[in-house]
Image: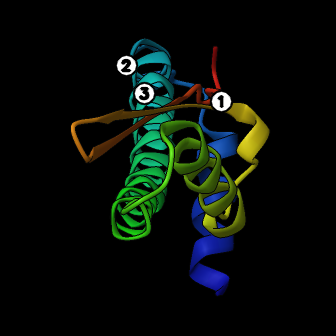
Amino acid sequence: MKNIVDLVRAFCDERSGNIVIPFALTFGFVVLVIGAGLDYSRAHNTKVVLQAAVDATALAANYDSEGLAEAKVKANAIDYFNAIYKGDPDAVKLDVTVEKGTVTVTATQAVQTLFG
């Protein structure tokens, strides 16, 4: 631990400035790359959770759709999605279509970025 403290102290006492310019030039790029990585990670996690909920909703709605009216199938699918989605269901734009006995569910959600 003492070695690290000594290194930091020596770094702060150094006055030649050899490292300041490269550090200043790369600092902005490093922050940008870290921010982009964090934003991508958040967006990907949201996509995975949303995709799982949409898949489960489509399967459940299709399973329960036999003999029901199209409006009832859509209502059941929306209720099912709202029950299983772990995020905020109000932030998701959910689209359920029923065509010839096939239920299709699509969803979109905006992800707030950290640096933008």
Q: Viewer-proximal residue, 81 or 5? A: 81
As helix, strand or loop, the secondary structure at mark 3 comes to loop
Residue located beneath label 1 in the image: 114
Q: Viewer-proximal residue, 71 or 5? A: 71
Say which of marks 1 and 3 sits in front: 1
Q: Residue furthest bottom?
A: 1
As helix, strand or loop, the secondary structure at mark 1 comes to loop
Type of amino acid at the residue the image marks with label 2: Pro
Q: At which x and y percent is residue 72?
A: 60, 47
Marks 1 and 3 close (CB-CB < 8 Å): no
Q: Viewer-proximal residue, 92 or 34? A: 92
Left or right: where does residue 93 sit relative to residue 12? left
Q: Quadrant of residue 22?
A: top left
Residue located beneath label 3 in the image: 19
Up-down: is 40 above or below 83?
above
Residue drawn at x 78%, y 37% as measured from the top left: 90
Type of amino acid at the residue the image marks with label 1: Leu
Residue 22 bears which disc, if any?
2
